[in-house]
Image (cartoon, rainbow, N blue to C red):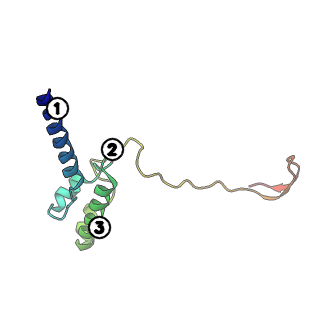
Amino acid sequence: MSNSLGKKIVSTLFVSLLSLSVMAVDYDYSSKTVEELNAIRGTLRDATSEQRDAFRAEWQVRIAAMSAEDRAKYRGRPANAKMDGQGQKMKMKMKRQGKGSGNCDGSGRGRGK
């Protein structure tokens, strides 16, 4: 019985330490090349917000340091980004509304366009 209890304690400690080590990982993208960072672009959908923020900060530093010609190569949607409609939503243009005074029942002098 004590052998089983000891195994449970050891396994619990192992899982706890593993969890803590994963949580303590600092997402350092500064050691990666621009090509490596570009390959990561579009794949961070399931990443934590800390990972995305760290990547975004490093990517912005790299883009700012590039020449205009190099910057143009990396502009736009990454080739490896999923195209399943889950990305950033574009703002829809509002329809033009008519002007005029009207009553609640729909009667009035509206001048819809």
Q: Quadrant of the C terminus?
A: bottom right
What is the crowding at mark 1: few (fewer than 14 residues within 10 Å), some, or many (at least 20)? few
N-terminal of the pair, mark 3 or mark 2, is 3
| Residue at (21% x, 59% y) in the render | 26
The residue at the far left in this view is 3
In the displayed structure image, the side of residue 11 where residue 48 appears, left or right: right
Residue 33: image tag: none
Choose mark 3 or mark 1, whichever is in front: 1
- Tell which tag, 1 or 2, sits nearer the viewer: 1
> Measured from the top left, where is residue 76 in percent x and y?
33, 58
Q: Earlier in the sequence, mark 3 or mark 1?
A: 1
Which quarter of the figure has residue 37? bottom left
User: What is the quadrant of the N terminus in the image?
Assistant: top left
Q: Position of residue 66 (x, y in %)?
A: 23, 71
Distance of label 1 from label 2 (alpha carbons): 47 Å
The amino acid type found where label 1 is placed reads Leu
Please identify, in this view, whether the residue under mark 3 or under mark 2 is nearer the observer.
3
Is residue 85 placed above or below 98 in the rendered structure? Answer: above
Instruction: Identify the element where label 2 is drawn.
Output: loop
* Residue that carries the numbered disc 3 in the rendered image: 60
Which residue is the site of mark 2?
Answer: 82
Q: Amino acid at mark 3?
A: Gln
Marks 1 and 2, the one that precedes in the sequence:
1
The type of residue carrying mark 2 is Lys
Which labelled disc corresponds to residue 5? 1
Residue 29: name its quadrant.
bottom left
Residue 53 x, y percent position in the rendering: 32, 60
- Residue 31 in the figure: left or right of residue 41: left
Disc 3 from disc 1: Cα separation: 51 Å
Q: Is residue 34 above or below residue 4?
A: below
Residue in view at x 31 percent, y 51 percent: 48
